[in-house]
Image (tube, rainbow, N blue to C red):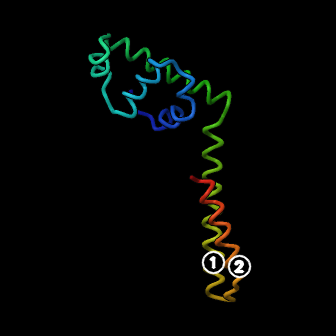
Amino acid sequence: MAKNLEVILLLDFYGDMLTDNQRNFLGYYYNDDLSLSEIAQNEGITRQGVRDAVKRAENQLFEMENRLGHAKRFQQVRRGLNEIIECTDNINDFNMRNSLSREVNDAVVRIKSIVSSLVE
């Protein structure tokens, strides 16, 4: 099984909706970077049992995302906020090279402050 960054994101969004075992197994596998064999040994079950639990949990995460779309929306908002920061940088650069308007500078600082508070 290839380790998938998308699963890590989905685990952050929907992990609380999984059972404790599913959440723990995915955490061990994706966050702690343990192999299926290591998890099986630590938990006292078979490697196949761990694999099955991980695959079921992954499928549940993907199903939740297909129905709810929170992770996709989060990524869209994040990209939009990054684009806003890029635009404010361009506005600020133009302002510095040309008119040096205090009002424009203050607006750019305010926009960046708002975006920063949303990103946190």
How packed is label 1: few (under 14 Cα within 10 Å), some, or many (20 or more)? Answer: many
Residue 104 is labelled as 2
**Answer yes or no: do the residues labelled 2 and 1 have beta carbons within 8 Å?**
yes
Q: Residue at x 63, y 54 (%)?
A: 118
x, y percent for residue 113: 63, 65
Q: Residue at x 57, y 23 (%)?
A: 17
x, y percent for residue 99: 69, 89
Q: Residue at x 63, y 77 (%)?
A: 92
Q: Which residue is mark 1?
A: 92
Q: Nearer the viewer, residue 86 or 105?
A: 105
* Measured Cα–Cα span from mark 2 to mark 1: 8 Å
Q: Residue at x 68, y 27 (%)?
A: 67
The vertical placement of 12 against 100, above or below, is above
Looking at the rendered structure, the secondary structure element under dot 2 is helix
x, y percent for residue 28: 37, 27
Q: Earlier in the sequence, mark 2 or mark 1?
A: 1
What's the residue type where badge 1 is placed?
Answer: Asn
What's the residue type where badge 2 is placed?
Answer: Val
Residue 2 is labelled as none
